[in-house]
Image: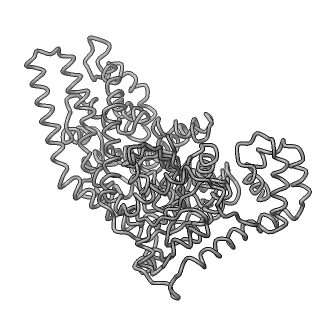
């Protein structure tokens, strides 16, 4: 089966094209950094099947960040039969820099000149034939979001697989550098190499550290590069200049732009929302409105339906089990364990759907990229890289992709800080916890309370980032370069798909991880035989009683709260599931809220929510930290230090609140 690789700059429409080609539902975002790992799918065309690989968006094929490494390693080592280079037609010069590097690697390239509709709006005229002729590769105009030009693009890509590729135009870097490249290629002849010798020679002259490590044991190479002395720096700059000369010569012959840039709606909106004084307050106001709408629509308008369905389901199942004379333990497990536990989580689906719908709207319009932009000055003042905020925003959905999004950071110092503070971002799994306690004590200020919790997570993350940058990871941050995409009308299909993906993931976790946790805890709650189930004498009660003193200074040192807190380390949704179970007989949202009101106070509820916001992330997040850092040490650190931070903050809330008379 032939393989087609998709590569391009961030936010050029690459993942949209991948979804169109494969029928997949990969998340598409109107901002850079959405794809940080390669995705694979199948394309069926004219009776044949092709493997399509979507590579992370990258501006170059250097080795500055892991997403760049993933892209370049797949192109060279994955041996794709053809590479579709997705180029943003509105920013063709910058996008072609990656194209020149693909040509240097000897990849078979077809260019998808995407977003041609937006280029037309900006009155940019592009001569496709000239562009193709001077690059020496096929060029096809596309609008992936509207499925335009797709068939022609696929036909060209398939045709290119079997073509001789020697006709591609080569770039000259000047007589001296060309000679050096030929000389280095000669030294590499006969060696077993992972990369093409011509490309290795170019990257070696550019001082690519990863390539230099690959060839350090080759005879005479190291000596030759050292002998270049100061010339090496000149060569590195000259190679970059020659690439841009090559690009500019082609663009001058193929692209015509209006003498004066067209002032777009995007430009007008950005003058306000990215203003250095107004930007952050506007961001805060928008998020506040989102949380208010979440409660108005998700709870007041839709919330009662699912709760009613769960109540009806509980009654139907209970009656059915009684009618068939099911054993008492089975009735207890199904009603108190499964419906009382898992059902207590499921009733919050409308609120979660509503929140992700509005966050999806913000993302799809392109506003989230502005949020990262306006936060950059604050991030930099705290010693953090601007891209860190992007991974933090991704963490609002789930901390696992949030941590993976840190791959876009170029240096290890920036990445480790971004990775370690990401779990303070309040993920979707924590939402049911907040909603139970907000419904119990803060119903009239639900949106404000949810906004305050999210804001607290951001503030704690920034403070910890500052501390890490001054202690564990000293040094300067790399520069933050971020392209602001144009505002686009949100695609309801894209927003709906993203919202459904997150809700479906939530439901899957409810049916698997949470179910497993609830089952285990239910078993612990009914043993040893002879004691009252769900009592303090049960195994669960005894374990909780041992743990409870840890949380006593925070105001909720009960065995029920303690076991629910520790169950949340497996999966945060399990906190509510366990609360629903340990208050036996409580199976619906309203009854759980009443039970919470009987054992918590507004102050202890706030303290509990702060702890769940900040304490140890779920097992999947810790496993991801281990995978990304390749270190048990950092995974253990991630498990312990947020717990300490969360405990301290929770105790402070309760103790200070008590002193103030709350």
Q: Which residue of the protein is positioned furthest toward the top in this rendering?
A: 530
Residue 478 in which image quadrant: bottom right
Name the residue: 34% across, 20% down: 524
Tell me if 87 is positioned left or right of 273 in this view: right
Q: Nearer the viewer, residue 633 or 528?
A: 633
Residue 243 lies, in percent from the top left, at 69, 68
Depth check, front residue: 550 or 227: 227
**430 relative to 347 in the view: left or right:** right
Tell me where residue 214 appears, x and y as whole percent.
76, 44
36, above or below 594, in the image: below
By what rule are the colours in the image chosen? one colour
Left or right: residue 249 compared with residue 510: right
Q: Position of residue 404 (x, y in %)?
A: 52, 47
Q: State the residue in front, 207 or 109.
A: 109
Q: Is residue 381 visible?
A: no
Q: Residue furthest bottom?
A: 259
Q: Where 129 sits versus 57, above or below?
A: below
Q: Residue at x 85, y 48 (%)?
A: 187
Residue 557: quadrant of the picture = top left
Residue 520 appears in the figure: yes
Q: Count the marks.
A: 0
Name which residue lies at 54% across and 54% down. 160
- Answer above or below: position of 519 versus 112: above
Give the x, y percent position of residue 378: 55, 66
Image height check: is 615 above or below 85? above
The residue depicted at 59 percent of the width and 66 percent of the height is 96
């Amino acid at each position: 089966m032939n393989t087609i690789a998709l590569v391009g700059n961030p936010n050029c429409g690459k993942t949209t094209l991948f979804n169109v080609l494969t029928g997949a539902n990969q998340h598409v975002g109107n901002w850079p950094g959405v794809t940080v790992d390669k995705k694979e799918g199948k394309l069926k065309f004219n009776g044949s099947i092709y493997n399509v690989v979507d590579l992370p968006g990258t501006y170059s094929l250097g080795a500055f960040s892991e997403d760049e490494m993933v892209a370049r390693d797949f192109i060279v080592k994955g041996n794709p039969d053809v590479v579709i280079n997705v180029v943003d037609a509105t920013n063709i010069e910058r996008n072609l820099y990656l194209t020149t590097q693909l040509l240097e690697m000897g990849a078979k390239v077809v260019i998808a000149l995407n977003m041609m509709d937006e280029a037309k709006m900006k009155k940019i005229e592009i001569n496709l034939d000239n562009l193709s002729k001077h690059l020496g590769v096929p060029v096809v105009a596309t609008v992936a979001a509207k499925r335009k030009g797709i068939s022609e693009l696929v036909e060209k890509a398939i045709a290119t697989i079997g073509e001789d590729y020697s006709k591609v135009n080569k770039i000259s870097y000047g007589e001296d550098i060309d000679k050096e490249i030929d000389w280095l290629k000669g030294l590499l002849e006969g060696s077993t190499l992972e990369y093409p010798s011509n490309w290795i020679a170019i990257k070696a002259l550019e001082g690519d550290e990863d390539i230099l490590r690959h060839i350090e044991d080759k005879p005479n190479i190291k000596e030759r590069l050292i002998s270049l002395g100061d010339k090496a720096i000149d060569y590195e700059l000259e190679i970059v200049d020659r690439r841009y000369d090559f690009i500019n010569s082609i663009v001058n012959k193929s692209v015509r732009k209006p003498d004066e840039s067209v002032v777009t709606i995007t430009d007008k909106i950005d003058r306000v929302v990215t203003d250095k004084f107004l930007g952050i307050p506007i961001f805060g106001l928008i998020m506040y409105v989102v949380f208010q709408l979440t409660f108005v629509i998700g709870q007041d308008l839709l919330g009662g339906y699912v709760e009613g369905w769960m109540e009806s389901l509980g009654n139907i199942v209970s009656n059915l089990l009684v009618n068939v004379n099911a054993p008492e333990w089975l009735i207890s497990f199904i009603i108190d364990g499964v419906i009382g536990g898992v059902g207590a989580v499921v009733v919050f689906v409308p609120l979660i759907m509503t929140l992700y719908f509005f966050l999806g709207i913000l993302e799809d319009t392109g506003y989230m990229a502005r949020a990262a932009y306006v936060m950059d000055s604050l991030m930099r003042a705290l010693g953090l890289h601007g891209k860190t905020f992007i991974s933090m925003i991704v963490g609002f959905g789930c901390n696992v992709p949030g941590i993976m999004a840190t791959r876009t950071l170029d240096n290890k110092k920036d990445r480790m800080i971004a990775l370690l503070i990401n779990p303070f971002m309040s993920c979707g799994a924590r939402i049911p916890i907040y909603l139970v306690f907000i419904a119990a004590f803060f119903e009239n200020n639900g949106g404000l309370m949810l906004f305050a919790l999210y804001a607290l997570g951001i503030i704690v993350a920034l403070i910890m980032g500052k501390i890490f940058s001054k202690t564990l990871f000293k040094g300067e941050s790399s520069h933050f370069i971020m392209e602001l995409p144009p505002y686009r009308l949100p695609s309801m299909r894209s927003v709906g798909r993203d919202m459904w993906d997150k809700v479906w993931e939530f439901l899957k976790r409810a049916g698997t991880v949470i179910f497993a946790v609830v089952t285990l805890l239910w078993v612990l709650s009914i043993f040893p035989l002879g004691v009252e189930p769900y009592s303090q004498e049960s195994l669960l009660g005894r374990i909780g009683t041992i743990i409870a003193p840890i949380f006593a200074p925070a105001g909720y040192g009960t065995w029920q709260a303690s076991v629910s807190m520790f169950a949340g380390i497996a999966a945060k949704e399990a906190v509510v599931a366990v609360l629903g179970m340990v208050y036996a007989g409580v199976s619906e949202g309203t009854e759980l809220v009443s039970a919470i009101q009987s054992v918590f106070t507004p102050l202890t509820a706030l303290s509990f929510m702060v702890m769940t916001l900040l304490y140890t992330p779920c097992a999947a997040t810790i496993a991801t930290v281990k995978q990304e850092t390749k270190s048990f040490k950092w995974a253990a650190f991630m498990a312990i230090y947020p717990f300490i931070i969360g405990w301290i903050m929770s105790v402070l809330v309760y103790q200070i609140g008590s002193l103030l008379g709350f």
